[in-house]
Image (cartoon, rainbow, N blue to C red):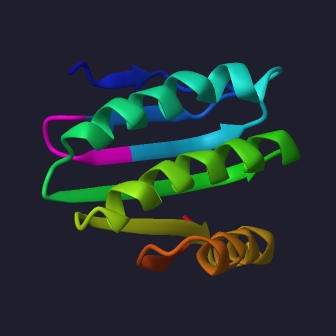
Amino acid sequence: MESISIEGTPKTPTVEFNSNNGKIEIKGRSIPENSIEFYKPLVDWLDEYAASPKENTEVNIQLEYFNTSSSKCILDVFKKLEVIHKDGHSVNINWFFEEDDEDMLEAGEDYQSIIKIPFKMIEIEEE
């Protein structure tokens, strides 16, 4: 199974979905012109990954900002991960936010309340 690696742009996040080590990362800004188009390959990849996931899947989400349509797509990603978790595999989501970014903290807490996967809120000190 191929891994996915997408270089970030001012409008789209850097994405690393690695099927070899079970690490999934989404970092940066997510305000693509068409969120569904951007996230569809990621959601499809997770369908394939779910067939034979690693023993532990680690998910790192570190977004500075995302728009409303991205938030729905991110939820779709989490729902796919929830299926893997429900099948008895270890899935951990690390939600990173900058120390003064209440909005990102709240967004993470909102996802945490919806998705039944262990969530860790990780505060990043601003440089």
Q: Which quadrant of the figure contains the N terminus? A: top left
Q: Which residues are magenta?
A: 19-24
Q: Which of the pair 71/83 is nearer the observer?
A: 83
Q: Position of residue 21 (x, y in %)?
A: 15, 44
**Residue 76 versus residue 109 in the image, above or below:** above
Q: Is residue 83 magenta?
A: no
Residue 8 visible: yes
Q: Is residue 22 magenta?
A: yes
Q: Position of residue 103 (x, y in %)?
A: 80, 71
**Residue 98 versus residue 25 in the image, above or below:** below
Q: Position of residue 88 (x, y in %)?
A: 24, 67
Our reading of the magenta stretch's main secondary structure is loop
> Residue 29 is drawn in which quadrant?
top right
Residue 11 visible: no
Q: Which quadrant of the figure contains the C terminus? A: bottom right
**Residue 55 versus residue 126 in the image, above or below:** above
Q: Residue at x 50, y 55 (%)?
A: 61
Q: Position of residue 60 (x, y in %)?
A: 42, 56
> Residue 110 is drawn in which quadrant?
bottom right
Describe residue 11's horizontal placement relative to residue 69 as left or right: left
Q: How many marks?
A: 0
Q: Which of the pair 78/28 is nearer the observer?
A: 78
Q: Which of the pair 112/94 is nearer the observer?
A: 112
Q: Residue at x 66, y 28 (%)?
A: 12
Q: Residue at x 46, y 22 (%)?
A: 6
Q: Residue at x 78, y 34 (%)?
A: 31
